[in-house]
Image: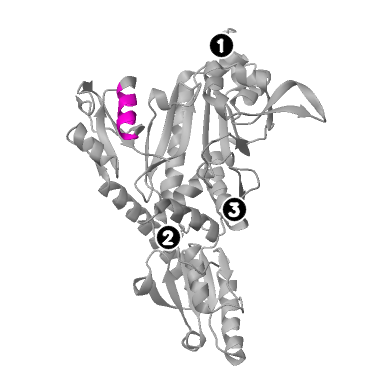
Amino acid sequence: MPETKLPTRADDFSEWYNQVVLRADLADYAPVRGCMIVKPYGWALWENIQASLDRRFKATGHVNAAFPLLIPKSFIDRESKHVEGFAPELAVVTHGGGEELEEPLVVRPTSETVIGHAYAKWIKSYRDLPVLINQWCSVVRWEMRTRLFLRTLEFWWQEGHTAHATFDEAEAETRQMLNIYADFAMNDAAIPVIAGRKSEAERFPGADQTYSIEAMMGDRKALQSATSHNLGQNFAKGFDIKYLDKNNAFQYCWTTSWGLSTRFIGAIIMAHGDDQGLILPPRLAPYQLVIVPIFKNDAERGPVMETVERLRAQLTDFRVKVDNRDDVSPGFKFNDWELRGVPLRLEVGPKDVAKGSVMLARRDKPGKEGKAVASQDNLASALSEVFEEIQASLFDRALSFRKAHTHDPRDYAEFRQVVEDGWAFSWWCGDAECEIQIKDDTKATTRCIPLEQPGGEGVCIHCGKPAKEKAIFAKAY
């Protein structure tokens, strides 16, 4: 454990984030620049994210599969917008087995092309549709500026790829998956997100329409936390994905893709963390509860540890860690698990053994405010209620923070001030040149055009032209 304190978020949010990732044992730097090693504690968090999403995917009829890491370069070239969008980020294999390859192979940046190739072979008739497949994997994008979890050369994610008979079915799928991501973010990660449509400039390369969920981080920047794309017939035409319809005529399929990555771990860190380190939502935390035994000598140790083991046996419905390290003090353990963001600490000392009680300490409420005495009887039921309170508290706090730092500026001068330190929810004409000028002036981008609109019409915050929709503008990761 480090001897120095974490930087405060107010003094240096970026360094605070880097230090939390390293000191909380979530990840470490890899020997290759821009790559990361996800450590067991970080991977356990990712596994819980996976489980939460995978359950939702399967409930809506999706199945998992695996597709190759290496993709023929010619596949990438078949969809012009796709290759144009990804060309600067491609990692290309030119040699294998000591010899130059006849055709270079691209290390998977995303799998639309190789999956499109497979779908062209598998789909023959309208009876084969829809195809609803997801895969869990890692991808490689040669990023220039990297940061652990937020932007690395290799990252882990899920990518869903579906094929449909009509545009309407594909659009319904795209929106359904966006809603699933929003439900997961708000209910399991306790992060309030805004679901919306991306501007044309911000769309996924090769998509007809891109939707995203956007979250406000603790420094008031935005983080794109998941995306869902209606690919139209672009990839279907590039890879000849056709089906024979009920009238015996060939039609191109309509396809979608959607994904959420380990970047979401960064969202959890920055949305909930404080100057002491991580604060993890109970539904995703690797450990929901840490039990810290407290004793001064062997005479006290026996009864305390006997009680601790009995309590652990009663709490099998939760993810529990007993910290029985002998080489550090209870105070050290308290600070350690605060840094790691465990939602609830349970302290057991000789007095607790005698009284049949335990001391509970909530991570979301530091100090005396978060402490309470609970009976050892019916402890599981009491903990369930506390975890639900913590989950709701984290969401409410993050939502209040976002609302407090989201503004509707009166004019462009005020807009420029707002996006220096928050979000602007402003009327926008939708013009690409207008969007570019706003970015050049302020470094803020259109995060999304929220699906929930106030109705009516207004004038563009930048150019004054008529506007029918409001957009979120913010600086972003």
User: Residue 75 lies in magenta, yes or no?
Assistant: no
Distance CA(mark 1)–CA(mark 2)? 58 Å
| Residue highlighted by disc 2 | 7
Magenta: main secondary structure: helix
Instruction: Give the Cα separation between the discs numbered 1 and 3.
Output: 49 Å
Mark 1 or mark 3, earlier in chain: 3
Q: Which residue is mark 3?
A: 28
Estimate the x, y position of residue 158 in percent, counting from the top left.
57, 38
Q: Are marks 2 and 3 in contact (CB under 8 Å)?
A: no
In the figure, is residue 192 to the left or right of 108? left
> Which residue sits at x=27%, y=36%?
425
Magenta region: which residues? 434-444
In the rendered image, is residue 65 in sight? yes
Which residue type carries mark 3?
A: Asp
- Residue that numbered label 1 is attached to: 251
Query: Judging from the image, what secondary structure is the residue with disc 3 in?
Result: strand
144 shown above or below 216: above
